Image (cartoon, helix red, strand yellow):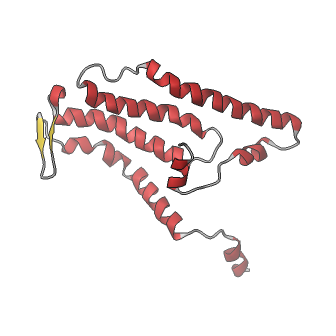
Amino acid sequence: MKENLVKSQPKVSKKSLVLGSIIATLLAVTPFLFNLYQSVPNERVWNTFLFSYDSGDWESANYAMWIFTGKAVPLMLLLIWFFTNRHWWYHALIVPIFMYIYQIISIYNDGAGVFDEMHFYYMIPIMAIIVPSIYLIRARIFNKINEASKSLEELEAEFKISPKNFWEKIKQYF
């Protein structure tokens, strides 16, 4: 009886365990990463043994890092969600991912100006691809529901992307 239970459990590779452990660790240390800015001095120039950071228009390296961690941590969480999600709608996550990337780039390009205003016209090309794609996938699902006798769960399972390694998933988009 005990042998049957052991045999019925799926085998997990070492690579999968390592990747899962890394992801779990990143999720567990998220509060620490978010508060990492507190270790940055409240000075205009932050000198370390690796680099020297001049906060420029921000006038405080601590404040600049607070802004950065407020954008980078949600971006990291969205990227984890995007690369671990197997549902058909996961492409919708690309829109907020690009929004956070744009905001991080504008933090350092525009300085202390109005950086958090999302210039909507920069997002139009991305949304012009993502939104219709998601709508077409949704339409295909509902067409199959009307034509077939499959349940919604079975159709969603049919549209799930099979798990791939990180680089294959990246190559899928380019």
Number of numbered callouts drawn: 0
Left or right of residue 50: residue 13: right
Using residue 115 as the reference point, say whether residue 153 is left or right of it: right
The location of residue 34, given as percent across then percent down, is 32, 42
Is residue 154 shown left or right of residue 104? Answer: right
When asked about the image quadrant of residue 74, the answer is top left
Q: Depth check: 122 or 161 in front?
A: 122
**How far from the left and from the top, in percent, is residue 54?**
14, 35
Choose between 13 and 122: the one closer to the eye. Answer: 122
Identify the residue shown where x is 36% and y is 51%.
29
In this rendered view, identify the residue nearer to me: 89 or 165. Answer: 165
Residue that appears at 58% across and 68% down: 12
Q: Work out whether 162 lies above or below 35.
A: below
Residue 152 x, y percent position in the rendering: 78, 41
State the residue at coordinates (76%, 36%). 141
Please identify the quadrant where the N terminus is shown. bottom right
Q: Give the residue displayed 46% in from the left and 18% down from the top.
A: 121
Location of residue 43 in the rendering, given as x and y in whole percent from the top left corner: 11, 35
Residue lying furthest front in this view?
Answer: 174
The quarter holding residue 150 reads: top right
